[in-house]
Image (cartoon, rainbow, N blue to C red):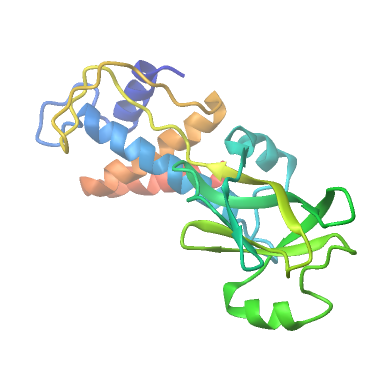
């Protein structure tokens, strides 16, 4: 869906297509509200409402809706004192999915390792537990997220080889050509459309409408936008 259609749909739902009153919606407000709606919607889909609060793959629809944001990246970093510390997470990082790595010791070739993400609070207990700590023979190790970095542990049994991170990135922000950013004063020269499918964009429009309606204290359109967005998730 192009940005011209997106703006028309938002103004239509706010009844601002031909309004000259003080509640006129400017283009930068539409951009800010829509980009906020994208992030809110993505976090809700990933969070979920099942036992483990993981919703990103609890249905085929969720998998299909979010697969565009799921990417893998190699992890650069330094290994010392039985732990591999990665470089800072990518700037577009939004949510963790999994870590993959291989391990190699002095006598055996590199092999795939199963990596479990664990809580930093329980790290000392896990490293002392013979059933949970890293073990090259079983092909298992653990990782934590701390300080915007990945920590992979080897328990002095093997070396970390070719680690990679699979994660959900942030959605690309839309931009409207000719729109002035009130924060920087810069005028956008290019048009950047929403990267999601049109059916998702329709949901995001309702989300954006509810945000804008709340800003201008339009209770009816706020409630309608919230209801429509939640009903179609």
Residue 159 location, quadrant: bottom right
Percent across and percent down for residue 26 are 19, 29
Q: Residue 134, relative to residue 101: is it above or below?
A: below
Q: Tell me if 49 is positioned left or right of 212 in this view.
A: right
The answer to whether one can see residue 19 in this image is yes
Q: Nearer the viewer, residue 104 or 48?
A: 104
The answer to whether one can see residue 14 in this image is no
| Residue under the point 63% across and 60% down | 49
Residue 138 location, quadrant: bottom right
Percent across and percent down for residue 4 are 34, 16
Q: Nearer the viewer, residue 20 or 48?
A: 48
Q: Residue 102, relative to residue 29: is it above or below?
A: below
| Residue under the point 32% across and 26% down | 12
Residue 72 location, quadrant: top right
Question: What is the quadrant of the C terminus in the image?
Answer: top right
Percent across and percent down for residue 37 are 41, 42
Q: Nearer the viewer, residue 53 or 128?
A: 128
Q: Tell me if 228 is positioned left or right of 31 in this view.
A: right
């Amino acid at each position: 869906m192009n940005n011209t259609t997106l703006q028309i749909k938002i103004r239509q739902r706010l009844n601002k297509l031909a309004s000259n009153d003080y509640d006129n919606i400017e283009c930068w407000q539409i951009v800010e509200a829509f980009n906020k709606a994208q992030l809110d919607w993505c976090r809700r889909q990933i969070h979920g409402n099942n036992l483990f609060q993981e919703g990103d793959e609890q249905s085929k629809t969720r998998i299909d809706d979010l697969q565009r944001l799921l990417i893998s990246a190699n992890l650069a970093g330094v290994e010392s004192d039985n732990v591999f510390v990665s470089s800072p997470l990518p700037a577009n990082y939004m949510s963790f999915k999994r870590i993959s790595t291989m391990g190699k010791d002095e006598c055996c070739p590199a092999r795939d390792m199963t990596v479990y993400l664990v809580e930093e609070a329980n790290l000392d207990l896990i490293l002392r537990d013979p059933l949970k700590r890293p073990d090259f023979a079983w092909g298992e190790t653990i990782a934590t997220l701390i300080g915007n970095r990945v920590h992979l542990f080897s328990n002095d049994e093997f070396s970390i080889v070719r680690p990679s991170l699979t994660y959900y990135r942030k959605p690309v922000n839309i931009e409207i050509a000719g729109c002035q950013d009130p924060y920087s004063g810069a005028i956008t020269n290019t048009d950047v459309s929403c990267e999601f499918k049109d059916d998702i964009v329709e949901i995001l429009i309702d989300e954006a409408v509810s945000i804008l309606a709340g800003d201008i204290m339009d209770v009816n359109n706020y409630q309608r936008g919230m209801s429509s967005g939640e009903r179609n998730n």
